[in-house]
Each structure stands twice: as C-alpha cells, then as structure tokens.
C-alpha cells in the first residue's frame, strides 16, 4: 500500500491508528513542500555583490560608493554582502569597458562610477563601452558651481567687462571645463582657458595662488574649502550653479544650492534678458548629458530584468534612508539629488542619438583648445 510518498508492503493485514496516519501524512507533505520553499529564497541571499569604482581608493567617487554600499545591502532582498573594488585607469574608462566587455551579467556586478557623457558623444577611442546597452540602476547628481576672484570681479555685473580673466580647468572634455567654457562664451566674457590641472583641488589651489581667476567646482569642494577660505574672506564671489535639465530642454534650478543663482538666472541678471543664441543652446543640450548623471550605477548588458528591478528599487530606498542622508550631510553638506531609472535610461540613450550639427560643433569646440 502507498501512503503519501511512502510505500509500505506487507503480506499481513496492516492497520495504523489515526494518529500514526496523520504523522506519516505530515512527513509526506513536508517532503513535497521543502524543494519549493528552497526555490522561494531571495536570489541575493548568501551571495556577494561587487561594486566597481573607476577611481582610486580615497577619491570622492570611491567614498561615495563605499558609503552607499553600507546601506544598500539592507534594502536588497536577501541582504547580500557588498564589497567595493577599485578599477581606475584610462581617465575613468577602464571600469566601464570592463563592465561592458568582461563582467558577468548575473546581477552580482554593479558599476558605480562617474560617467563621461562627452566622451560617449564624441566617440573617444578609449571608451569602448556603450552606456545605452548597460541597464541603468540609479544615479546621483553632484551639483557644481562657478566662482571668481574679487581681485578681478567684485560683483556679478563686472564679469562682462573684466579683462585678463583666466579660467582654470582639467581637460576640455571634463564636465566642469566644458560647461564652464560654454557658459562664459554664451555670456560673452573675454577669458583665457588654462587647462591641465590634475583635479578640482589643484584648480582651487591655483585660484588661491592667483594663477587663475575662475573655476567651476563641485558643490562639496565649494562648501568645505572654497566658501570658508575665499568667499567668507572676501577673496571670491559665487557666480552661478549649473542646474538640472532633461533631454527635452527643460531646466530646473537645484534646491540644494538655492543660495547661488542658476546659470539662467545669472545670465538674465547681468544681461537683462533670458539667455539665447547658438552657444547657449549647446550649453542647454549638453547640460543633462554631462551634468545630471555623475555617480551612475550600471549593470553589464543583458542582465536579467528581474535583478535589474530589484537593484533599482533598492537604490531608491537608500536615497530615502534618514541615516544615509545624515551621512551625506557629513560628507557633502547636502544630499545628492536622485536620478531615477527612467530619466537615467533616457539620458544614456541620447548620448548615441546626437544630431550631426551638434557633433560637428562639439568636436570643433573641443579640438580648438586641446
């Protein structure tokens, strides 16, 4: 005879009391259910997720990734172990090439690093990764702003007539430099572009030494270094911040830097009319593509959609966590605005759908100062 999954054979009459039958039935049910229960365990349970950063340990991007990772695991079902691995090199392109060409698409490899939209738009040879094929998990916008030494410009209105201004930067395709040049040119400011500094801190020190006069800097550098040592001492004044924008051309000032006017507000203040002209249109077109997505979390191409969704949802939850926000306040003095999956995906797609006249303009604009 067969009871549940247990077969009992006997040549003699066989009887079991009711309690014994109940016990055997429970055992049989447990035997059937256990495999299904195991299959329902979260995918990430007991696994290790690696977060790759294309910068050196201790850099701003590295610290941002490590702080984020401390909170991310608690919002991923199964709470995987998260480790951070640094892959610097190639001006930040090595990590993206690795993510697009080498890393497994199992949802356990996330690439959290500064993007370079200008390099993608211009098809720079060192960047082989195509961001539009890599699922966008989430992003953080790192605000930035422009300031000038008061030795040359004592008020915003004086910027238009100042002589001998020097704008310090790192590389023509870096967002600070590209946005800074476009903004100054659209305003009609006369200046000399001085490039080749190794980072924002180096440009800041050059301003302090009087070697250059204008810098576009991250808001964090401004709050913790520039504002207390230059602005509060009367040695510099803030000019504008580069706002948020979408690919349709809609521009919004950033609430986290409400004490400094947006570029559009600054332009109208000194010119008496809203910004316009071809260079301004280029500034507005390039703005979301190089400025909105700074710290971006992407996955290798063809990562299963279910795992993409899990990571997207958990990414958003981290940005809403009060403890994480408190850490941001300690690190930056403000919270980095979230770039959601829909917005980020659209921006990355647009990097590879560039009008020919825009490409021609940007290539010539950058080549003239290389």
Image: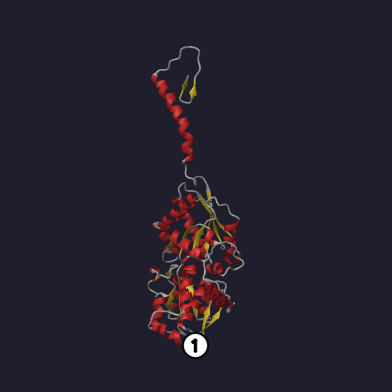
- What x and y, as percent, mark residue 294? 49, 65
- The image quadrant that residue 338 belongs to is bottom left
Answer yes or no: is residue 201 visible.
no
Question: Residue at image x 49%, y 79%?
Answer: 214
Residue 278 appears in the rendering: yes
Q: Position of residue 245 (x, y in %)?
A: 43, 69
Q: Is residue 59 above or below residue 363?
A: above
Question: The residue tagged with tag 1: helix, strand or loop?
Answer: loop
Q: Decide if residue 268 is on the left or right side of residue 5.
A: left
Quadrant (top left/top right/bottom left/bottom right) for the C terminus: bottom right
| Circle 1 Cα neighbour tier, 10 Å, few/some/many (<14 / 14–19 / ≥20) | some
Q: Is residue 319 above or below residue 365?
A: above
Residue sitting at the far top: 12
Q: How is the image coloured?
A: secondary structure
Given residues 245 and 206, the one toward you in this image is 245
Residue at 59% across, 68% down: 124
Q: Residue 183: x, y in percent?
A: 47, 78
In this figure, what is the number of numbered marks?
1
In the rendered view, does 260 fall on the left or right side of 200? left
Vertical order, 159 against 198 (above or below): below
Q: Residue furthest front?
A: 356
Q: Nearer the viewer, residue 354 or 90?
A: 354
Q: Whole-percent x and y of residue 274?
A: 39, 79
Q: Residue at x 41, y 82 (%)?
A: 156
Q: Nearer the viewer, residue 175 or 155?
A: 175
Q: Which residue is labeled 1 in the image?
A: 163
């Amino acid at each position: 005879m067969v009871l549940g999954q247990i077969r009992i054979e006997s040549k003699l009459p066989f009887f079991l009391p009711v309690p014994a039958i109940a016990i055997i039935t429970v055992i049989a049910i447990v035997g059937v259910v256990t495999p299904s229960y195991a299959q329902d365990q979260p995918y990430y349970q007991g696994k290790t997720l690696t977060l790759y950063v294309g910068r050196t340990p201790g850099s701003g991007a590295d610290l941002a990734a490590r702080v984020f990772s401390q909170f991310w695991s608690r919002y991923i079902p199964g709470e995987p172990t998260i480790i951070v691995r640094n892959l610097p090199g190639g001006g930040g392109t090595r990590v993206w090439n690795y993510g697009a060409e080498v890393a497994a698409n199992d949802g356990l490899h996330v690439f959290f690093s500064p993007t370079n939209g200008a390099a993608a738009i211009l098809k720079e040879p060192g960047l082989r990764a195509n961001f539009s094929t890599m699922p966008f998990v989430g992003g953080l916008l790192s605000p930035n702003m422009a300031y000038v030494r008061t030795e040359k410009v004592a008020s915003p209105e004086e910027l238009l007539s100042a002589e001998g201004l020097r704008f310090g930067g790192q590389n023509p395709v870096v967002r600070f430099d590209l946005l800074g040049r476009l903004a100054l040119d659209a305003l009609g400011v006369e200046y000399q572009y001085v490039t080749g500094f190794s980072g924002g801190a180096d440009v800041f020190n050059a301003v302090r030494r009087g070697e250059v006069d204008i810098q576009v800097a991250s808001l964090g550098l401004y709050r913790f270094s520039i504002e207390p040592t230059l602005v509060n001492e009367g040695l510099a004044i803030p000019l504008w911040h580069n706002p948020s924008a979408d690919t349709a051309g809609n521009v919004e000032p950033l609430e986290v830097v409400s004490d400094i006017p947006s570029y559009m507000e600054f332009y109208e203040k000194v010119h008496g009319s809203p910004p316009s002209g071809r260079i301004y249109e280029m500034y507005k077109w390039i703005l979301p593509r190089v400025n909105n997505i700074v710290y971006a979390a992407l996955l290798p191409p063809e990562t299963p959609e279910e795992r993409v969704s899990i990571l997207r949802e958990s990414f958003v939850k981290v940005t809403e966590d009060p403890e994480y926000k408190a850490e941001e306040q300690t690190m930056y003095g403000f919270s980095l605005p979230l770039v959601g999956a829909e917005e980020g995906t659209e921006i990355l797609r647009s990097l590879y759908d560039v009008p020919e006249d825009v490409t021609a303009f940007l290539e010539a604009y950058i080549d003239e100062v290389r």
